[in-house]
Amino acid sequence: MPLFQQAVFLTTVANLRDLPRDSLCEVAFAGRSNAGKSSAINTLAGRVRLAYVSKTPGRTQHLNYFTLREGKYFVDLPGYGYAKAPEEIRSQWEGLIGPYLSKRDQLAGLVVIMDIRRPLTDLDVRLIDWFRPTGRPIHIMLSKADKLSRQEQTKALRSMKAELATWGDASLYSVQLFSSLKKTGVEEAETVLAGWLGIEKKGPPDKGGPEAKVSQPG
Ligand code: GDP
């Protein structure tokens, strides 16, 4: 059973005081709007529309919690980077997402989804700079890898690895290629996340498993 396959939507959190109290361990997913975050979550879950709940009215600017196992969650953070209403976005970051990222004890690590063709935008860097002082791990998923040739993918991966090497503690930062369209990178992501969450990973290999057949991006 792949790690995310039993994930179910739990709740939307708009205020820090409403964070689940029973959480033992959670991982958060962040990314620029349109980077492919929802598709990546749906692909990991093997479900076409799981992360779609995060895109429904009233939920887009909040933290959306999904249950993986009792007490273990993943958290879909609002996509960032829309040009409109920067003030609103800033205040929301300062009020909810910033404090969540820097103070949530149960947060085991942060996944940042970046379009492989536009990695490390200014807002990605801001988010990462906000999180790094926590000393917790960051895993970057270079999404939509299928948009580039093999050679270009390798080049993008290599250059991101070189960038990560400048961040210090190599054990904290990792990067991988991912494609929701081609369903590539699923195993690699699961291995990292299972490690963070302390969940034993069992199940079929990347290709040919149930996740190979379901879910199209978007
Ligand atoms: P989000 O705003 O970060 O949640 O992004 P979405 O998951 O909604 O994806 C944004 C757009 O990118 C949609 O049109 C998706 O179909 C497309 N997309 C997402 N993942 C992939 C992928 O792996 N490959 C390709 N070619 N397109 C993708």
Image (tube, rainbow, N blue to C red):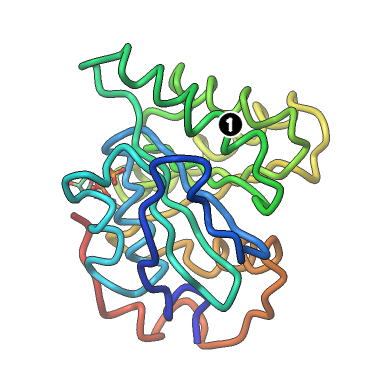
Instruction: Say which residue appears at 48% left-offset and 76% top-offset.
Output: 206
Residue reaching furthest to the top: 87
For this view, does 142 lie left or right of residue 170? left
- The x, y position of residue 121, in whole percent, is 43, 21
Dot 1 lies on which element?
helix
Residue 9 or residue 139, whichever sits in front: 9
Residue 121 vertical position relative to residue 142 in the rendered view, above or below? above
The amino acid type, in three-letter code, at marker 1 is: Pro
- The x, y position of residue 218, in whole percent, is 18, 54
Q: Quadrant of residue 49?
A: bottom left
Residue reaching furthest to the front: 17
Label 1 sits on residue: 99
Instruction: Say which residue appears at 37% left-offset and 60% top-offset.
Output: 11
Residue 48 vertical position relative to residue 218 in the rendered view, above or below? below
> How many discs mark residues in the rendered view?
1
| Within-10-Å neighbours for mark 1: few <14, some 14–19, many 20+ | some
For this view, does 64 lie left or right of residue 206? left
For this view, does 45 lie left or right of residue 130? left
Instruction: Say which residue appears at 34% left-offset and 42% top-offset.
Output: 148
Instruction: Say which residue appears at 35% left-offset and 66% top-offset.
Output: 43
- The x, y position of residue 95, in whole percent, is 48, 26
Residue 84 vertical position relative to residue 184 in the rendered view, above or below? above
Q: Quadrant of residue 27?
A: bottom right
Mark 1 CB lies closer than 8 A to ligand 1: no
- The x, y position of residue 163, in whole percent, is 65, 26
